[in-house]
Amino acid sequence: MQAETRANTSVELPPSPSAHLHEHRDGDAQHAHFNVQRSQSVLAWSLALTLGFAVVEVVTGFMSNSLALISDAGHMVTDAAALGLALLAQLIAKRPPSARHSFGFGRAEALAAFVNSLVLLLLVGWIVFEAAQRFSKPEQVQGGTVFIVAGIGLLINLVLAYMLSRGDSNMNTRAALVNVIGDLLGSVAALIAGAVIYYTGWMQIDPLLSIFVALLILKSTIDVLRESYHFLMGGVPEQIDYLSVGADLGKVDGVRSVHDLHVWDMSPGHPALIGHVEITDLACWPEILLNIKSMLLEKHGIDHITLQAEVASQART
């Protein structure tokens, strides 16, 4: 009986000393600074499949001496690292704000996407370099082996792409999906290269298709790299027109001018705004602020707002 009593007794941990500083009350922005609903199951399964087949492709790629297959194998190894980094980033992003990190850890996902993109750029450079070497000195490739392994890799990558496309839509997952799509194209290229070599013996098709895939990967990688860099540098969100925000603020009744205005993403998809607003009468500020919040949320989708009101005399001193 005593054991049952102890088992049913829950121990409540004391709240963090800074917990009340991070809470949102009535009138504050409603989004959380951490991703509590983000699921890691899709990334975990994708990581397991990618890592398992990467080992197979690395071995058979060197055995068959196919650059197309080796590049696809290297890409899958990079995919595994990228997916592992994405999984770790999502786990970190779930952590709530702390006394040392008051904004939370939502930027971990963008950081992972940025690092993944840099690694992919290095991989593209290596593929192009190796392909250039093989154009001048073609090497013998086992077309049959390449065809079979690439076919299996294509099926696995189709499954991975489907899983990731059905998962959470965020910058980090999109970066992982870019990796997998690039690998899928690599499998298609290796499949074609294997068939052409097997039936015609034309070895140059191997480096030629490798360069083609590398260029496709490069385009997608640059897009993700640009997006993650823009976010990490605190750039104005793509869907928000900074000049229009400033103009609309100046049109609110009671507002004379706006200065020191900044707009950025607190976490992906959650824009924030801070600035100074010069008004004619400080007593009217509560009503003006209410109108500003309503306008910014309705017209620009911004609900995390911090504004400092200044009367005309204060703004000029």
Image (cartoon, rainbow, N blue to C red):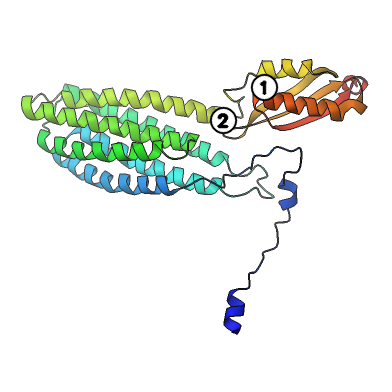
Query: What residue occupies the far bottom of the structure in this picture?
Result: 1
In the image, residue 12 lies at what x, y percent? 67, 65
Measuring from the top left, give residue 10's x and y in whole percent: 63, 69
Dot label at residue 264: none
Q: Is residue 256 left or right of residue 74?
A: right
Q: Is residue 134 visible?
A: yes
Query: Residue 17 placed where, x, y %?
Result: 73, 56
Count how many numbered circles sit on residues in the image: 2
Which quarter of the rendered picture does the C terminus lie within? top right
- Residue closer to the observer: 278 or 293: 293
- Name the residue carrying label 1: 299
Q: Earlier in the sequence, mark 1 or mark 2?
A: 2
Q: Could you say which is closer to the camera, residue 298 or residue 168?
A: 298
Kindly state the secondary structure of the residue where label 2 is placed.
Answer: helix
Give the quadrant of the N terminus.
bottom right
Question: What crowding class fits label 1: few (fewer than 14 Cα within 10 Å), some (14-19), or many (20 or more)?
Answer: few
Q: Is residue 89 left or right of residue 217?
A: right
- Dots 1 and 2: beta carbons under 8 Å? no
Q: Residues within 10 Å of mark 2 (few under 14, many from 20)?
A: many
The three-letter code of the residue at mark 2 reads Phe
Residue type, mark 1 in image: Lys
Rounded to the nearest whole Å, what is the CA distance between mark 1 and mark 2?
21 Å
Name the residue: 59% across, 44% down: 105
Image coords of residue 135 (percent x, y): 18, 22
Read off the residue under disc 2.
231
Viewer can see residue 262: no
Dividing the picture into quadrants, the one containing residue 244 is top right
* Residue at 85 percent of width and 21 percent of height: 278
Q: Secondary structure at mark 1?
A: helix
43 to 131, vertically: above or below: below
**Does 32 sit above or below residue 274?**
below
In this rendering, which labeled residue sits more in front, label 1 or label 2? Answer: 1
